[in-house]
Amino acid sequence: MSIFSFFNFKSKLKEVFSQENITELLNYVKSNIIEQVKNSIDGAEKKSNVDNAVITFIKTKLVSSNVLVNVLVNVLTEYVPVITQCIYDYLKKYVDGLTEV
């Protein structure tokens, strides 16, 4: 890691974790959860499908040349199951039929 990684960290962080990227990520999670309602598989498999799709989305969309930013992206991917569960819990209050098989 070079010393320049520290100097461009802030700009690269703003670039990767921009409001547009985060909004797109959250909308992707929401739409993916709602899409899984249409599948006739059990809940654990639906959750796994959503988590895997979101992790793939993060790894393709939130990419940086800065090593430190990539570390933060990797930390984010570790918390995907928690994030998707929180969004699901929120959505089930407002989307009819979300918890039905």
Image (cartoon, rainbow, N blue to C red):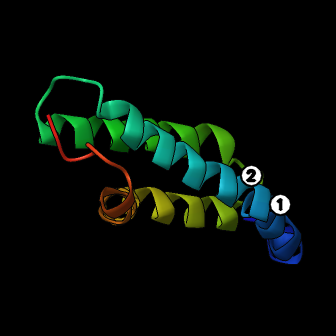
> Does dot 1 land on a helix, a strand or a loop?
helix
| Disc number placed over residue 64 in the picture, else none | 2
Q: Quadrant of the N terminus?
A: bottom right
| Disc number placed over residue 65 in the picture, else none | none
Above or below, 12 against 35 in this view is below
Which residue lies under the disc numbered 1? 15
Residue with the most extreme front position: 96
Distance CA(mark 1)–CA(mark 2): 8 Å
Q: Residue at x 74, y 52 (%)?
A: 64
Above or below, 8 against 58 in this view is below
**Left or right of 88: which side holds 12?**
right
**Left or right of 60: which side holds 91?**
left
Q: Nearer the viewer, residue 44 or 97?
A: 97
Residue 68 visible, this angle: yes
| Residue 21 in picture, x, y percent from top left | 72, 54
CB under 8 Å between callouts 1 and 2? Answer: yes
Q: Residue 43 occupies which quadrant of the picture?
A: top left
Q: Quadrant of the C terminus?
A: top left
